Amino acid sequence: MKCPRCQGHVTVQQNTCNACGFSATLLHGYLGNQWVKLERITDAAHCLRLEEARRAEVVLDEFERSFPQAFFATYLGVLPNYFNVSELGFWLLNQGAFNTPSVSRRNDFGVVLVVDPSSLFASLTLGYAVEAYFGEDRMQQILQSVAKLLAEGAHGEAIVTACTRCAEVLRKHGTRTAWSPASLGGGSQPDMGLQPLRGGQKQSSRPLAGFPHS
């Protein structure tokens, strides 16, 4: 996997990035380390029109029908200066309990798009079970498409495009591999890794701290 701060290579055994010193625990001081319940589309910036949100939900539904173990989620919000969209995406996949139709979906199989509509920055964070399917060139192509739409103010279309392009990648590889948690090696990982949060949600949840919601 890549470090969300410096994009350096990090193995699943590492708790800290050797290049920049980033650790998931650094984000806990800003956002906490409890689970947070989120919708598949969290529009904290209030930049989606109702029809845009509805169309995006339809595309997300189709994604989950095509890939029963996986889910696609989006967070739109203006981020504070002290961390970036990649770091927030990393935290969301570690701490988020996303409201998908099937609560058995694990974050190891999640794809999270984070958009800061103020800076026009966006990131895609992939769970361990799906990241091997996405090459660097393909990720850059998807993000470039998203950036172009964000520059035009088409936030809903950016979500639809990112989800559709990710589905194309998974569909291509799914024809050659057995698409199942056992074959893709999910499960808990060390501190830098992802936790399987899709099971019982008995711990207390909390809102995202430090974000403007109006």
Image: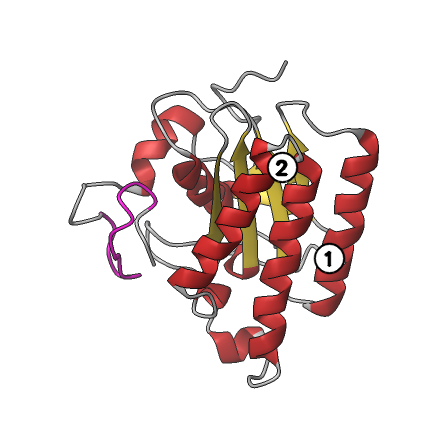
Q: Which residue is drawn at 73% across and 57% down?
A: 102
Q: Looking at this rendering, what residue extends furthest in the left direction?
A: 18
Res 46 label? none
Q: What residue type is labelled 1?
A: Ser
Q: Kindly indicate the quadrant of the structure image that contains residue 29.
A: top left
- Is residue 201 visible in the rendered structure shown here? no
Q: Kindly indicate the quadrant of the structure image that contains residue 14.
A: bottom left
Q: Is residue 174 above or below residue 84?
A: below
Q: Is residue 171 above or below residue 126?
A: below
Disc 1 designates what residue? 102
Q: In this view, does 60 lie above or below 54?
A: below
168 vs 183, nearest the viewer: 168
CA gap between label 1 and label 2 equals 14 Å
**Residue 66 x/y as whole percent:** 72, 68
Q: Which residue is drawn at 43% across and 29% down?
A: 32
79 vs 21, nearest the viewer: 79
Disc 2 designates what residue? 37
Q: Is residue 135 left or right of residue 120?
A: left
Q: Residue at x 54, y 35 (%)?
A: 115
- Of label 1 and label 2, which has the lower sequence position? 2
Magenta extent: 4-16
Task: Assess disc 1: are there few (<14), some (14-19) or many (≥20) residues with their C-alpha within 10 Å of its C-alpha.
Answer: some
Residue 188 magenta: no
**Residue 75 x/y as whole percent:** 59, 36
Q: Kindly indicate the quadrant of the structure image that contains residue 153.
A: top right
